[in-house]
Amino acid sequence: MPKPKRVVRIALAGNANVGKSTFFNQITGASQHVGNWPGKTVEKVEGFVKFGPYEIYVLDLPGIYSLSAYSEEEVVAREYIAVEKPDVILNIVDASALERNLYLTLQLLELEVPLVVGLNMVDVAAKKGFRIDVDKLSRVLGVPVVPMVAVSGRGVSEVLSKAVAVALGSEKVKPLKVTYGKEVEEAVERITRLLLAKLPSLCKTYPARWLAIKLLEEDEDVIDKVLKTPNGSEVLESAREIIRQLEKVHGESSQVVIASERYSLIGRIVEEVLKVEKRSLMTLSDRLDLLTTHRVWGYLILSAVVASVFTSVFVVGNLLSGLIEEWFSALITPLVPRNIGFVNGLVDGFIAGLVLVIPYVIPFYLLLFFLEDSGYLPRAAFLLDSLMHWVGLHGKAFIPLLLGYGCNVPACLGCRIMETAREKTILGFMITMIPCAARTIIILSLVGSYLGVHVALAIYALDLAVVFLVGRLANMAVAGKPIGLIMEMPPYRVPSLKVILVETYVRVKDFIFIAFPLLILGSGFVGALGDLGLSEALSNTLSPFLNFVLGLPGVTAIPLIFGILRKELTIAMLAEVAGTMDFSKVLTPRQMIVFSVFTVFYIPCIATIAAMFREYRLKKTVIISLANIAVATLVSILVNLALMSAGVV
Ligand SMILES: Nc1nc2c(ncn2[C@@H]2O[C@H](COP(=O)(O)OP(=O)(O)OP(=O)(O)O)[C@@H](O)[C@H]2O)c(=O)[nH]1
Ligand SMILES: [Mg+2]
């Protein structure tokens, strides 16, 4: 007797922003990026879960709207599905946008793969007054349909057990055969026969009928595959003749004929299974949408949102920071010997991490992920569309840019949502100059604390102006033309506390395990340099540049060097080399401003450079980093001169 199968491979397929990653995280315990805007998952990611006696490998795929060759993701997804043949495809469908989502479902059915539909967001659908007859939908499609709410976990394990049952063949399915009108069917059948007779090898990988439909749709990727197979050009020739005849009868291109027949089938299915109870009452989401995309109110709200995020991070950060410092220094300072620079450095690094970093980082991430999960970001992108066009980008580029305020690393990786390499490059220049959470700490705890939050906000404004100027220059320098695009606008949702906490936790964990040890060791190292009498020599080497060009004292040399590793190190090292957390003893107000401005721009940290290298390869990474250094120097000189002439000491 054969051993029962224990390993099941499930691939998640669905439109963008329907909750695939939320489902993936729910079952695997992973922390894939989740948020309310389309296009977050850019690469397939595998996870593992033990489910009863089964070992399940789940694959989270980027969102796709069809299985055509229109976008890279769609080709990648269908190749994976057709060639790798996972045991079952779990099609995650947004119940509140059934019609649009079923377009992909029909195409998955055409690909003749084992299919289960996870009907997600039934909570949202219910709020909209949608009543979906799940059993009927399941009967019509001929595959299991299981309702669920991925964020809360409702129905998630039922979906999983159905998927396992279909994968193992213990649940019999009779998938709907998508049939077209008479003429199209005739054409499909003729091409199918041709393919089976002439290209049997290709028909082993892909279903012949699917290939025939794709040929009718003049899918470039499939045409390519056919041409690469022996006898291919002959088959293509005959298929073209069949298409010509079909187009003559319909008076439209065969692509249009097929798409409209699919839509009319979907229309009939939706009519049968969906009843709308409350009709067209304006929901809160609709009202918020109107308000936040309004020509006047929209911009006022956007400014208010941005200003209040930074102000509240500052206020909360300052408060926490003060409290921690008071308690902690009092507690720990008497316990350590102060005469050894190394030990002193370690302790100071630890205190600096606690006092300067954590209080600002946590509130900032909480707010950022609240905004991200609510669905506000695509509205902001919409408002800023024309501004983004000024730098040759589409409005949605604003989202990675904004995420850059959290951390440049995911922002750089998020550049992949852009359609062309040109847009990615322009965005790369801009993102690396956005002050991330670490640089925010420097601005807030230095300029914000000593000179007032208005000066800190002015630095942000200056930064944004420079970022757009650099983008404009990059737009002129990088060859190619800007392209237009329409972005889907997801509805507002009440953000999930769990999602926000998990996303924040992931980033803070990263900080605690990577930055914090570095901070302590780095600070110890600087202390040891002092013990050995070396710190002066190091400062002296860089002093001329810092003194004469930027007007900064030599003590800033070591912090700036450490800042290349992690930006948080800059401020902690400043405290260490200065031997005090009272920065007003070592820097004048003008120097505080210039130092902050320089740190914001001067070079991306190691982690960002690595992320850029992944996305842009060596040449562009070097160019972007050099641009950062040049911009930092230039802007700092100008700021220094301007402040001097204004009489700021
Ligand atoms: N109300 C509600 N929200 C949900 C549900 N499932 C997911 N969400 C939210 O929907 C948004 C999108 O979820 P994701 O898991 O990021 O979607 P995705 O399909 O992976 O999106 P992409 O990777 O961009 O294609 C997030 O804000 C989730 O919190 C649900 O069942 N109900
Ligand atoms: Mg995702």
Image: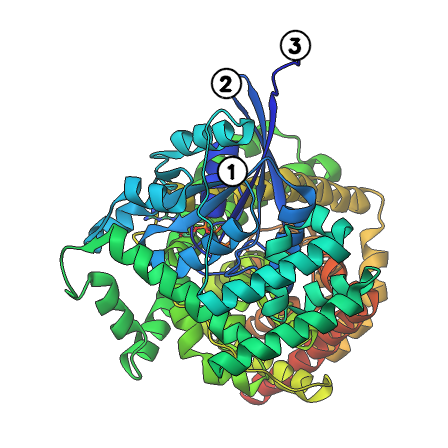
Check the image and report above or below for 238 versus 563: below
Which amino acid is tagged 3?
Answer: Met
- Cα separation between marks 3 and 2: 22 Å
Which amino acid is tagged 2?
Answer: Gly
Which amino acid is tagged 1?
Answer: Ser
Q: Secondary structure at mark 1?
A: helix
Q: On the rendered structure, is 612 left or right of 94?
A: right
Q: Nearer the viewer, mark 2 or mark 1?
A: 2
Give 64 or 601, whichever is nearer the viewer: 64
Q: On the rendered structure, is 237 left or right of 442?
A: right
| Residue 351, horizontal then vertical, whole percent | 57, 41
Task: Assign the N terminus to one quadrant of the image.
Answer: top right
Task: Assign the C terminus to one quadrant of the image.
Answer: bottom right
| Residue 383, horizontal then vertical, whole percent | 40, 78
The residue lying at 46 percent from left, 66 percent from top is: 182
| Residue 407, horizontal then vertical, whole percent | 58, 57
Residue beneath label 3, please?
Answer: 1
- Cα separation between marks 2 and 1: 51 Å
Give 40 or 167, whichever is nearer the viewer: 167
| Residue 490, horizontal then vertical, whole percent | 37, 63
Q: Nearer the viewer, mark 1 or mark 3?
A: 3
Q: Is residue 290 visible?
A: yes
Tell me the tag on residue 540: none
Q: Secondary structure at mark 2?
A: loop
Q: Is residue 408 visible?
A: no
Tell me the tag on residue 52: 2
Residue beneath label 1, please?
Answer: 329
Whether the residues at callouts 3 and 2 have beta carbons within 8 Å, the answer is: no
- Cα separation between marks 1 and 3: 70 Å
Quadrant location of residue 136?
top left
Q: Which sits earlier in the primary sequence, circle 2 or circle 1?
A: 2
Q: Nearer the viewer, mark 3 or mark 2?
A: 3
